[in-house]
Structure formats: C-alpha cells, structure tokens
Amino acid sequence: MEKTYRHSIPFVYKLLAGFLFFLVMFVIAMLFGAADTTIRDVWLAVSSQAAEEKISLIRDLRLPREIAAIFVGAALAIAGAIMQGMTRNPLADPGLLGLTAGAHAALAISLALVPSASSFVLMLACMIGAAAGAALVFGISAGKKGGFSSLRIVLAGVAVSSLLYTIAEGVGLAFKISKDVSMWTAGGLIGTSWSQLQVIVPCITLGILLSLLLSKQLTILSLSEEVAVGLGQKTTRIKILLFFVIIMLTGASVALIGNMTFIGLMVPHIVRTLVGTDYRSILPMSALVGASFMLIADTLGRTVNAPYETPVAAIIAVMGLPFFLFVVRKGGSALS
Amino acid sequence: MVRLYTSDLRIGYGERLIVKDLSLKIPDQKITAIIGSNGCGKSTLLKAITRIIPHQSGAVILDGEPIAKENTKELAKKLAILPQTPEGASGLTVGELVSYGRFPYQKGLGRLTKRDVAVIDWALEVTGTKEFMHRPVDALSGGQRQRVWIAMALAQDTEMIFLDEPTTYLDLAHQLEVLELLHRLNVEQRRTIIMVLHDLNQAARFADYMIALRDGQIVKAGDCEEVMKPDVLKKVFQIDAQIGRDPRTKKPVCLTYDLIKGEAK
C-alpha cells in the first residue's frame, strides 16, 4: 500500500493534463504557419517518405524547428527551476544570471577562431561559456557578507551579461562574422537542422534525466542549506552535480537557438502554482510547460506578422518582462 | 552514560575564533539548554556539534567516534537538527515536508516504505499537526509551523534532537506549547534534547542540564540550581539578577535584573 502526502488532485493527473496540453500545442505549432498545412500532411511528413514539396517542407523545416522548440523550452525551464531551488532566489534564470550571455560570447569566439567548428564543438564551447558566465556572476555577488541577495545577483547578472554581449559583438565585428553571430543572438529557431538536433537533443535529454534523478535532493536543498546537511545530504557534491546539469542544459540550448531569457524564470513560477514546491513535481512539469511555452511562442512568431518572422526571443521577452516585474514586486514569497 | 561530548573544540570563521577549546558533555536522555548572550557562540556550537559547520580543531565524539569521520546519512539517523526559523520552500504541504525527514533512510529515488509511513504518521500525530497535513506550510501560523518542523525532525527518528531557539517569534502560549512537546518527547520517548534558548526562566524550567556560554567558553554547566545564580548570570550576561523561586514549578527564576554599568569585563 502506497500512501502519499500530496495535494487534492494526484500529481499523475496533473502531469497527464500537462502532457495533453503539450501535445495540442505541438499539433497547433505544426499546423499553423506560412504555408497551409493539414493534419494529414503532418502525418505523412512524420510517418512516410513522401517527397511532395509541401511535405518535405514540413519534414525538413518545420519539424526540426518545433523539436528544437520543445527541447530548448524544456531545458531552459528545468535549468531555471534548478537555479531557483539551489539559490533559493525567485529571480534565478539562466538568461538573467549570465549563463546565456557567457555561452553566447563563447559561441562568438569559437565561430571567430574555428569557422568550421562542428555543432558538437560549438555546444561544448557554449557550455564552457555558460559556466564562465555563472562563475563571474556568483563570484561578483558573493564578495561581501550578506551573501547572495536576490537582487544583488540579478544586478551582477545584468552587468556581466552586458560585458559578455559586448565581447561577443566586438569579436563579431573584428572577425567580420557579426551576421553569423547575430543569427544566434536573435534567438532564432530558424534554420534548425536535423544534424544540429542529433548532437543537441541527446545532450538535453541526458540533462533532463539527470535533473529528475536529483529532484529530491534539490527539494531538500531548497529548504535551506542547514536543513539539507541536517538530513544527511552531501550538499557540496549535490550542488556541483546540479551546476553541471544547468550548464549542460543551458549550453546546449544556446548552441541551438541563441539567447532566451525569461523562460527559465517564468515557467517554474507558473508550475509552482499548479503542483506545489516539491521539485519532484516541479521539474517534470516544468519540462512540459516549458516545451509548450516555446511552441506557443514560435507559432506566434511565425503567424503574428506572416509572412515575416517575429523573433521568438522577442515574444518570450514581451511575455516575460511583466512577469519578471511581478516576481520582483512579490519578493521572496514568490518562491513558494 | 555520555554518548556525546566535545573535547577542546575550536570553531571559527576564517581568522575569527568563535568557540575556543571547549569541552562539554551532553547528558544522555536529558534536556540540555545552552544559554548565553547574543554572539557568544551558542548557535555556532550547536551547528558544529551537528557538523552543519566544520570545526577547526578538537573533536566532537558520538558513541566513541569523531563525527567528522561519520557518513553524513548515518549521522542524520542519529541526530536531527532544527535550525533557527527555517523558511525555504514553504509551499510544500505539511505531509510532504515531514516525509522529507525520512531522507536519511532512503536510497536512490526512495519511495516511502511502510516503516516510513508509520514514522511520519506518528510524527504528525505527536506534534498535533496531522489535521493540516494537506495544507501548505506557509498557510500555517508561526506556532503550527514550528511544530511541523519539529515533526520533520521527529520523522528522522533520531535519539538526539538539536533545536536552535525553537521558541523565537512565538507568543507566550505557543512557546510553552513547543517546550512542553519537547518535554513530553524527552519523558515518554527518552529522546535527548539539546537546544539553544534565549529565555532563562524557560531554560531553568525545562532543562535538566544548562550550559552557560560567554565568548565561546563555558562559564558554568550544571543543573538549574547551579547555573541560575547571580554570580553566574553576572559573568554570562553582565546583569545583576535577583533569583527567586517559581511558586508552581519550584524551579529558580530570574525575578528582575539590572545592567551592570561601568565595569570592565
């Protein structure tokens, strides 16, 4: 007999509902766009080898792009959730704390130095950059006693991010690769190819699986450092592991689509209102909601001003900024 | 019998020494209260004994072994600590939070076993928190919340429970409620309780053994009759205290006190 201590609706049903919502968003994302598409076309594109123009368009352009949206959305949402839990900072987000900027700078530098770099090398570079960005932000904000106050970290994040963006831009100009770099900066899902996905999807999948394995430890850590140690957690080891997971997820995401702020901030907060503050529930739910969110944003991006594209990053930012301000106003209590 | 003691314990942050060469014994199956003024090192001492922070030299010995060498999870089965006013992740339900007390006993993804469920149930029952088991922790009052955290420490099923100022921010009735709960656990379950307390009279009323600290060193350790004395309180708090007797509990109480002025420490 298994007895659980949970909210009224069992988590499994909530997860199932989340999954259905995600599926619907996926279908919608596949159907709407510049070219008229029917469910039958999508089905053919996925299941057959049919080579009609319309169908291969779906297969080679829209499908990889939506798959990228799904994985990046899930990765960034989980990375944000882990960061919020680890730092107990409701404003933590890979975009706000210098990780994506670091990855972005690393991307520019590697494109400049090794123009022919493979997706895999670029992804590694992005991960290293993300780690460096995070190290800078935490290094700066940890300086004095008083520790990691929420706003101080965000301020450090803004400062470090601008520095890193400037570096990326400078490198872009100096090596005359601004255009290549800005393709990523715009946060584009445009031009996602199957070959990129082959490298990045396994990495993100691994990161998500690891995060789920660590979710219980994360909840304990999110209670407080002292409580975690008191319960017998080896906190340093767990924090290092979690940090690697964050770096993996963020680095891979940036390598695929460039900057994307706010999704990691927003999604976990929305998820908490749905499933509570146990990370065993938050993480899987964040993955689903994050993926759905990116699908919505991308669908909007393709349809709002068709036939022109509106950058996904812009759409996410438009939705995310009010949310950010809301969390700032609510202060620390927003964590729960 | 003494299961837990420290020898020449030295604790500090960087250059700053908080606790200097402190040796003390924690009596088994008793309630011990650590008292002292702000910044005297009592919380630091509590954290070092429960290895939440490391010590610089000396040793904390539990059952003949230094705790520094003990496996963290094994140690968490022997002693539980309730830090001062824990706050994080208060959106967890009471049941969820208390069930995390079973963490040291779980392996891998760790589903709750029958034994876990039984202990959690008992912890909720004995702290009177079962009725709001499905409510989020932050929807509770301060006193209820404190009892929930105590329930989590109880779910750890340890023989020793450490508490850092368990009555802070509670009103008088709720303070007493928490202390009586701890007293009951000590009497009925023979748990060893070690807590930092601010209130002298509460310490005298509930503790079997009192440790008075000043500048990271023991001024006096013993039962309340030995510690609740004007000369001890003078050294510990720089106060001129008048000690009387509680008409109900017959324990010593500090009736009134004045600051001692113009006297060098």
Image (cartoon, helix red, strand yellow):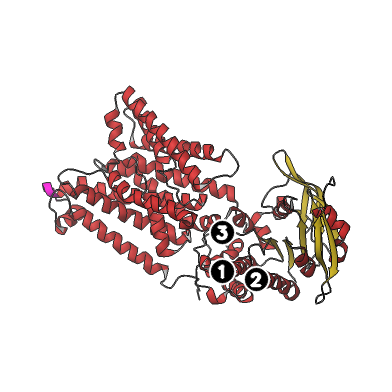
| Residue A247 makes an appearance in the image | yes
**Badge 3: how crowded within 10 Å, few (<14), some, or many (20+)?**
some
- Mark 2–mark 1 Cα distance, whole angstroms, equals 10 Å
Give the residue at x 28% y 31%. Answer: A180
| Of the image marks 3 and 1, the number of the one nearer the N terminus | 3
Q: Secondary structure at mark 1?
A: loop
- Mark 2–mark 3 Cα distance, whole angstroms, equals 18 Å
Give the residue at x 30% y 59%. Answer: A22
Q: Is residue B262 above or below residue A336?
A: above
**Badge 1: how crowded within 10 Å, few (<14), some, or many (20+)?**
few
Quarter the N terminus of chain B occupies: bottom right
Q: Chain of mark 2?
A: B
Q: In this figure, which residue is indicated by the disc labeled 3?
A: B87
Q: Nearer the viewer, residue B41 or A21?
A: B41
| Of the image marks 2 and 1, the number of the one nearer the N terminus | 1
* Res. B7 mark: none
Q: What percent of the width, then of the height, locates residue B203?
A: 77, 65
Q: Secondary structure at mark 2?
A: helix
- The lab-note entry on whether marks 2 and 3 share a chain reads yes
Q: Nearer the viewer, residue B121 or A307?
A: A307
The part of the chain drawn in magenta is A50-54
- The lab-note entry on whether marks 3 and 1 share a chain reads yes
Q: Is residue A89 left or right of residue B5?
A: left
State yes or no: residue A52 in magenta: yes
Give the residue at x 26% y 54%. Answer: A296
Are the residues at dot 2 and dot 1 in contact (C-beta closer than 8 Å)? Answer: yes
Q: Chain of mark 1?
A: B
Q: In this figure, which residue is indicated by the disc labeled 1?
A: B141
Q: In this figure, which residue is indicated by the disc labeled 2?
A: B174
Q: Chain of mark 3?
A: B
Mostly what secondary structure, the magenta segment? loop
